[in-house]
Image: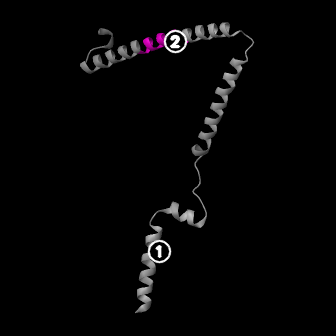
Amino acid sequence: MEWKKLITDLNQNVGQKYDEGYHALLDRVGLQEKRSTAESVLPMLGIFGAGLAVGATLGLLFAPKRGDALRHDLRHSLEDLQRKGKIRASELVEKEHASEGNSRAAEAGESPSAT
């Protein structure tokens, strides 16, 4: 009878200790779960991007142009980029409105050119 009680207690204790999941079990054995490719590549890409930003900043700081000329060029480049972005956004909005009109006409049974 003692053996039966001992085995039951042992089974209960082992079950309680390892019900936490396989992460805890691997940790107890001294192993770890294999990391996915994304978990190892994404931090490297983040560090690479930060290095690019620091390098670009240092390049601008030590550029051969004078500061006011460099700021003038940067301002005009940003304004040009902003203007192109607004144009592209308005084109996309117009395209979306045309697409919505065509789909509404198709739902109503009309031809898209009739709208």
Say which residue label 2 marks.
Answer: 82
Residue 106 position, x and y percent, is: 29, 19
Q: Residue furthest right?
A: 64
Tell whether position 55 is magenta: no
Residue 16 position, x and y percent, is: 43, 71
> Is residue 48 positioned above or below 63 on the image?
below
Q: Please, what secondary structure does the residue beneath circle 1 have?
A: helix
Q: Residue at x 47, y 68 (%)?
A: 18
| Mark 1 closeness class: few <14, some 14–19, many ≥20 residues within 10 Å | few
Q: Residue 14, which numbered label?
A: 1
Question: How many labels sit on residues?
Answer: 2
**Disc 1 + disc 2, Cβ < 8 Å:** no
Magenta-tinted stretch: 81-92
The picture quadrant where one finds residue 12 is bottom left
Tell whether position 87 is magenta: yes
Q: CA distance from mark 1 to mark 2?
A: 64 Å
Which amino acid is tagged 2?
Gln
The picture quadrant where one finds residue 63 is top right
> Is residue 33 positioned above or below 40 on the image?
below
Q: Residue at x 50, y 62 (%)?
A: 22
Apparent side of residue 61 relative to residue 82 in the rendered image (left or right) = right
> Which quadrant of the figure contains the C terminus?
top left
Residue 92 position, x and y percent, is: 43, 15
